[in-house]
Image (tube, rainbow, N blue to C red):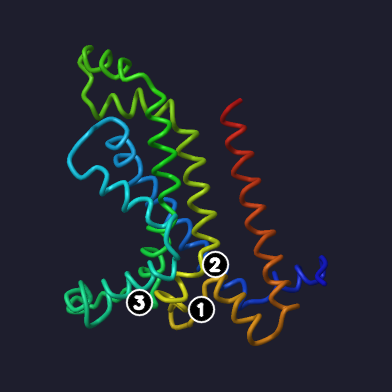
Amino acid sequence: MVGSKGIISSLKNVSFLSAVYVTLIISTTAAIFAVIFGLPLGYIIARYEFKFKSVIETIIDIPIVIPHVVVGIMIVLAFSSQYGLGPFLHKFGINVLDTLLGAILAVSYLSSTYTIRIIESSIKMIDPEIELISRSLGASQMRTFFNVILPNIWRSVANGALLTWARATSEAGALFIVAYYVLLGKTTVYPSSVYIYESYVGLGLIDAVKFSAALLVIVIGIFIIFRLILNLRRE
């Protein structure tokens, strides 16, 4: 149904490349956010017991147990012009729906679970006594984290970020609700998952398969490059 010629022709399609470009921006930003927020959150969950901890863990795991369309509707309710934070944000000209910001918020929440949980598991595998020794020698908690904990879990953090990136790249359900399209400059661009769906509806199965195969080639290529970089660091 689709061969190398179909994939190459898809990779030359300007509108498809724009969709991939937007998707890469969204997924890469989501992965960065997952690491920034996942490191402290994963550490706190792994090392401390506190009130409402189970509530926070439930919120983290929600993307795994409910349809992503539901999460999209929740985000719309939270940021639409008539509900939630929407009216307040609109006063400052900040729009969430059908923007890069909205798409990033949606996929960041839906895909960060993997990074947070991997970081948490990695930290639990490190003996807390090591931290206590570092603290007893005069190191602050922050310095202990960056000099003792992070060097031991950086590979897990990288793998978690990669999983978050991949999950964000494949997201469709929430984007159908929150950001079916986004404005890139003055141009309306579909995220790649929406673009492929539109191709299926408007052009037919064969074209959708070509674009799907082209996206798969791009994602696998990035995966391979990332893994090679990690292996080089290991050596």
The image shows a total of numbered marks equal to 3
Distance (Cα) linking label 1 and label 2: 10 Å
Q: Amino acid at mark 2?
A: Tyr
Q: Which residue is mark 2?
A: 21
Disc 3 vs disc 1: Cβ atoms closer than 8 Å? no
Q: Quadrant of residue 174?
A: bottom left
Query: Element at badge 2?
Result: helix
Disc on the earlier residue, 3 or 2: 2
Q: In the drawing, does residue 47 fall left or right of residue 6?
A: left
In terms of secondary structure, where does tag 1 sit? strand
Alpha-carbon span between mark 3 and mark 2:
19 Å
Report the residue that reaches farthest toward the bottom: 202
Identified at 37% across, 56% down, the residue is 62
Residue at 21% x, 73% y is 84
**Which residue is label 1 attached to?**
189
Q: Amino acid at mark 1?
A: Val
- What residue is shown with label 3? 97
Q: Position of residue 74 (x, y in %)?
A: 32, 70
Q: Amino acid at mark 3?
A: Leu
Mark whose residue sits in front, 3 or 1:
3
Residue beneath the point at 51% across and 64% down: 171
